[in-house]
Amino acid sequence: MKIIASLLTLFSSAAAFAPSANIKSSTAIRALIDDLPGATLPFPRFDPFELADLGSESTLRWFRAAELKHSRVAMLATTGYIVQASGIHFPGMLSNTDGVSFESLAAMKPLDAWAACPEGGRNQILFTIFFTEMVGEISQEGGSHYTKGGGLPTIVFPPVDFSGVKPDNLYKKQCAELNNGRLAMIAIISFCAAANIPGSVPLLAGSPMF
């Protein structure tokens, strides 16, 4: 009985301290948001779904890395969409075997163009994405993985040396990249919606791009 009573005492003591530990951890993670690039006006702590509370510091850094990757892809996608909608495309054939030309793809909506792309081409695109993801995940800038406080994953061709950039300037550039990427994510999803659901984006209604 003494042993059981002792164990119950220990469990009750641990339970008493658990909420306090969780509060401290949550507070530390919330404070980390202010230090990460991207915490800028007008929404320095924009987190409507409270994703920062879903895990540890490592989880938050993983979320930030995912946001950065999506931002970069969205900027490329937005630029590519505008270029294609302007009638600019590569000359010649994408696949002589399948009879698919770059001109024919440029005249299609994005999802239709992806479906019309030969399977081999789609596989090459997916492999390239997989390769860049692998390189980004195994890179350890600053001596540690980005989820452990190291630099965020970067895939830059050709490589760019940021060692001579002052910390304040680097932080401003990182904030600018994220803010531009956030706008690009809104832009590309708006383009896709306007192209596939007429009238879904009033600001783009009547645009010759759609």
Image (cartoon, rainbow, N blue to C red):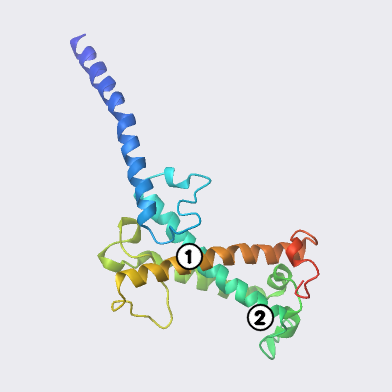
- Give the quadrant of residue 209: bottom right
Question: Looking at this view, is 194 or 169 the one in front?
Answer: 169
The residue to which callout 1 is attached is 178
Residue at position x 47%, y 64% in the image: 68
**Residue type pointed to by label 2:** Val
The residue to which callout 2 is attached is 83
- Give the quadrant of residue 187: bottom right
**Residue type pointed to by label 1:** Leu
Mark nearer the N terminus (1 vs 2): 2
Q: Position of residue 99 (x, y in %)?
A: 75, 84
Task: List the single residue furthest toward the front.
Answer: 42
Image quarter of the C terminus:
bottom right
The local secondary structure at tag 2 comes to helix
Marks 1 and 2 sit apart, C-alpha to C-alpha, by: 22 Å
Q: Residues within 10 Å of mark 1 (few under 14, many from 20)?
A: many
**Residue 152 versus residue 104 in the image, above or below:** above
**Residue 11 versus residue 46 in the image, above or below:** above
Left or right, 110 with reference to 125: right
